[in-house]
Amino acid sequence: MKRKMILAAVAYMAGLFFASFFTGTFSLLLLIPAAASVFLVGRYCGMVRCDFIIAGTCFAVAAVVFGLYTSLNYDRITAYDGQTGSFRGSVTDIREYSGGKSAYTLKGTLGGKRSAKLRLYTDSLDAEYGDCISIENCTFSIPCGDYLYDPEERMRSAGIFLEADNADGVRLEKRSGHRLMRSIIAYRERMCDEFRNEMGEDAGNFLAGMVFGRSSELDGNVRTSFARCGIAHILAVSGLHVSIAALLFMELLKKLRVNRFAAYATMNVFLILLILLADSPVSAIRAAIMMDMVYAAGLFRRQNDTFTSLSAAVLVICISNPYVIYNSGFLLSVAGTFGIGVCAPYMTRELSGKGLSGSILSPFLTMLCTTLCILPLSMKYFDETSLISPVTNVLVVPFCGVLIVIGMLYIFTGGAVSLLAPAKYVAETILSLTDRLSHSGRIYFSAGSERIVGLAFALAAAVAMVQLIAKRRRFTAYAAVFACALLFFGSAVSSRRFFSSFNAAVLGSGNNAAVVVTCNGRTDVIDLSGSSSSADYVRKYLTRHNITRADVLVLTNNVQAQYSAYRSAFDSIGINECFAAGDTPVYGSEDTKVYGEVGYVYTTDDYKVAYENGVLTVSYGEAKVSFAHAASRAEDMEGLCVYYGSSGAEFRKNENAVYIADHGNCFVIRLSEDGGHRIRRL
């Protein structure tokens, strides 16, 4: 039975994955050799006819369900893309942003006949869960992102297929009801405020992030530090949090001598409330299902193992929402649970209980197995993975577990049991330690390119194949070591090719842009528009390409604000020299040099950079590339002319406009010294 459950879950998830990411005739042709390979490996592993029937049926059903869901739901809703109309729906989610802006998720009907969820970005309306918001007129569009942030897959997994642009006549209608959800939301906000008041802003937000999954309120550099130390998972409510909460609650019920059936039912109610408090993340739902199966097995005198309960949880979640396959939190949660609950126990079986060396090596190898299991996914979704994750998870996460216990005791007793004073010092110590570690050198491995990410997935599949065929821990370990070495070697080769060539990246959004020039190990950043968001685009680009220092930073507009934005975004990236437009010294910086309003020119060993009257020109050998905003109508540019930002239809016909980026502005130009060029969108 366990084997069939695992087969069904793996096949169903594979069917969703294939139907979602592999489309077209070529993908269908790939299915034939893939199926033949699975059949041969399955026969070698002892699969019988019944096993193949279960696996094939689940794979086919998943693909059909995904196709039907797409055709009957997604396609019909996204058919409204580009159309204008009205919308009216109830508020199901609220996200607050700076500057008095909010994002509301509305559940209503399109054209009065099709139920749909819509994301509305507007001025804060002081709306509550269950209130009604009506939009008199708007343009419907499919959510799309850019190089910095791509919300489409995350919103698609949540069933949000459209957003409202240029919304007019937005009105709020207060509604009564939904008292339970409103009470839960209000209580969560009150607890977060109390954390901050008692522990300070940083430590309070850290505890709120662990208890409620409110990581978005943490400073971006703090989130980066945790990611590079390999413990970012503690900021998402998942298996660790659910396990701690369930164990505490069941221990309490045991002390009170509550009937085991009543305790089981009460625990389920408790887990539901915990999930609602954390805003219902799919990782917490997965953990709750598995925890429920663990206690149900004990209640009814049945055996249970991690792989079976994980498979059951995956099946339940995937069947209820075919688009959960797009959810990064779900995939990372499944991979991490497989690593710590299935892979690690198998690989460390011979070390368990074998003296001091076993007690020290076993937890380290457990976290190493978990890190390797999530490595391809972390590279895909976060562009990097931590190299010290096994160490930090063993040494730091236990203290984070103590903080989670303190936080849960506080919120579930309404503050009656308060240990926030000592928790403050623990939290500040962890924040300080992770910040120092993230600045202490190369503790993370960056993807560098999509090819390296693809190589990581291919190598992971190869290691899994070795295990299925060889069925020996030693061979699997050798294969994993070889795969990691090959991955690092491939990344090094890719980075060397990148740095040995001339690349000019245009990064930004809308009418904002910054240019990053890299050549032979040198990196220059020239901000052209003065938007605070440009620093985040540049930071992501540098991080993805393992660049830890910029040789020159040139600020051309909005200098004072831009200097602060880059200093904040470049918390872990050094700047050798900074030059700013104007004659007024930059406040807070003694090293920044001002170059006046006319322009700036400097020459390196490989290229020349000149900025004048809003036009940036970079010369490399016989090649030249010039950058200017499309609205400037600059026509005296030299070489390859690159216009960023919005432009009118008339300007698009201009023959000098070699490349116009009206949306995103994120692309890379690779120049050769003889004047040739190649453009690649990021």
Image (tube, grey):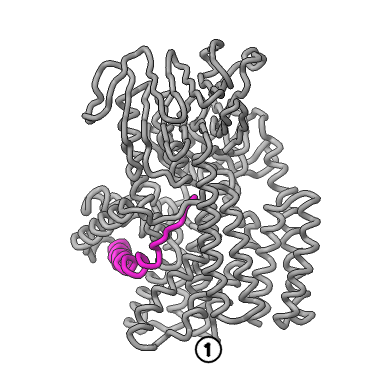
Is 394 included in the stretch rendered in magenta? yes
Q: Is residue 421 above or below residue 222?
A: below
Please name whichever residue, 373 or 203, is drawn nearer the observer in this view of the structure: 373
Location of residue 99 in the rendering, given as x and y in whole percent from the top left corner: 37, 32
Residue of label 1 = 301
Q: Is residue 553 left or right of residue 373?
A: left
| Residue at x 50% of width, y 69% of height | 337
Is 276 included in the stretch rendered in magenta? no
| Residue at x 48% of width, y 84% of height | 349
Location of residue 361 in the rendering, given as x and y in whole percent from the top left corner: 38, 78
| Residue at x 34% of width, y 53% of height | 441
Chain part drawn in magenta: 382-411
Q: Is residue 252 above or below residue 319?
A: below
Q: Is residue 452 left or right of residue 559?
A: right
Location of residue 110 in the rendering, given as x and y in whole percent from the top left corner: 66, 38
Instruction: Let me know if residue 212 appears in the view.
Output: no
Location of residue 422 in the rendering, given as x and y in whole percent from the top left corner: 19, 63
**Quadrant holding the C terminus:** top right
